[in-house]
Amino acid sequence: MLRRALRLRLGPCLSGRGLGTYRGGSTLDWDGKVSKIKKKFQSIFPGGAWSPLYDTSHLPPERSDVVIVGGGVLGLSVAYWLKRLEKQQGAIQVLVVERDHTYARASTVLSVGGIRQQFSLPENVQLSLFSAEFLRNINEYLAVVDDPPLDLQFNPSGYLLLASEEGAAIMERNVKMQRQEGAKVCLMSPEQLQKKFPWINTEGVALASYGLENEGWFDPWCLLQGLRRKLQSMGVLFCQGEVTRFISSSSHMETASGEQVTLKRIHEVHVKMDHSQEFQPVECAIVVNAAGAWSGQIAELAGVGTGPPGTMQGTKLPVEPRKRYVYLWHCPQGPGLEAPLVADPSGAYFRREGLGNSYLGSCSPTEEEEPDPGNLEVDYDFFQEKVRSAWAGYYDYNTFDQNGVVGPHPLVINMYFATGFSGHGLQQAPAVGRAVAEMMLEGHFQTINLSPFLFGRFYFGEKAQEHCIL
């Protein structure tokens, strides 16, 4: 809006008249007058070089084919695959809108950076298998000419999940499915567990599953910065601001059952600029909701879930922020370098951090213990007393089935989702971004069928329940 106003105000007097046609003098005369004007401005405002009356370089473009709301790894992955899969280089203009380019509160950089294939759903196993391949070959995917290669500092130490007698049969079924999907996972009895990891107390442990390949942890900040660097080289635009409004048009139709539904198409996104009340409207063809823990709020801005209860129009995106703590402690007599990421039946987990006998971990709260997500303050009493430091981050928690939401909305027909992964979005981002880009460009999933993760399941009550959430 501000850019348009400036163009209207300044256009007739500057851009509409060529310098060589200035009346009353030659081009040299005009250049001299401009030089005097510059000097006068500099005398009034000392210390600064000459600059235009208003700098619009920080504003988003007036139009973009795709606007991605959220600049974490999921949003960046969608942008990457859109550019990688476009039929003609430069054919798709992509804008990524992120509220905080420091990423100080971003789920991506506040996570523990784990990757595993030990899930209860085949789709999640497939997603993490491809993401592991992507991370192993990161410099084939994200290399930029004349820039140094990325080092994700991947630690392939695996995940070790422990099961009680009650959960042993479920673990067996999960591992059988994981192997069928191509994951390298083995089962271990308490005796085998004690032999391989003598520091583990096996009391109450009936069975364990251990990831032999493609599991461990890596540096999330490096992946985030690598994606941003690559996207900039591919021509993707970035904007620091907050999406506050969508302008859409509506049409009405009747379903086969006689139900009247309203279809919406977003035409314009309003982006409020950082530290300002000004907003910039951006015309667009497609919006991708990758706003993480706040994607439910973005969906509601677009009219998702604002209709009558019990209808598709009244079905909300069930994603909300859930706060999770991470604690760091020092233990000189700890497991050492051979320690995998260990998770027990209670939801407690830990892994090695660095080479100096430091470890980080936490435990999953019960519904009754859920902390207030209004801030990122840490409750040190939640875990244990003797910790060196701690921090908190957000899960984009899907309260329906703790699983991701991908693909288009059935009624807001040009809003696509990449959100709701409830703590495993970072590790699956490379595969999720590819899936969403496939759906946008081809109209269907091509490499991994993520139909169970579509939005419609919330209306029909068809859960894609993921039980292995840490």
Image (cartoon, grey):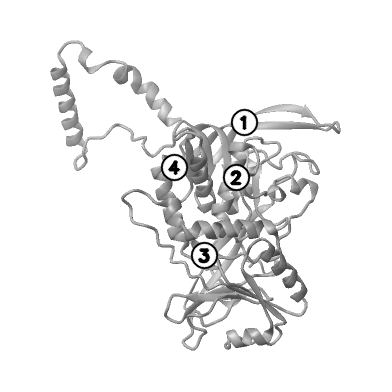
Q: Residue at x 43, y 49 (%)?
A: 228
Secondary structure, mark 2, is helix
Residue under label 1, please give it.
248
Instruction: Give the quarter of the image for residue 129.
Output: bottom right
Badge 2: how crowded within 10 Å, few (<14), some, or many (20+)?
A: many
- Please name the amino acid that badge 4 sits on: Cys
Toward the viewer: 155 or 17? 155
Toward the viewer: 466 or 302? 466
Residue under label 4, please give it.
239
Looking at the image, is mark 1 or mark 3 earlier in the sequence?
A: 3
Label 1, label 3: how far apart the Cα atoms are? 38 Å
Q: Are marks 3 and 2 in contact (CB under 8 Å)?
A: no
Label 4, label 3: how far apart the Cα atoms are? 26 Å
Label 2, label 4: how far apart the Cα atoms are? 21 Å
Residue 275: image location, x then y, percent = 43, 45
Q: In the drawing, does residue 43 fall left or right of residue 186?
A: left
Toward the viewer: 8 or 213? 213
Residue under label 2, please give it.
436
Label 3, label 2: how far apart the Cα atoms are? 22 Å
Instruction: Give the quarter of the image for residue 344.
Output: bottom right
Q: In the drawing, does residue 221 fall left or right of residue 115?
A: left
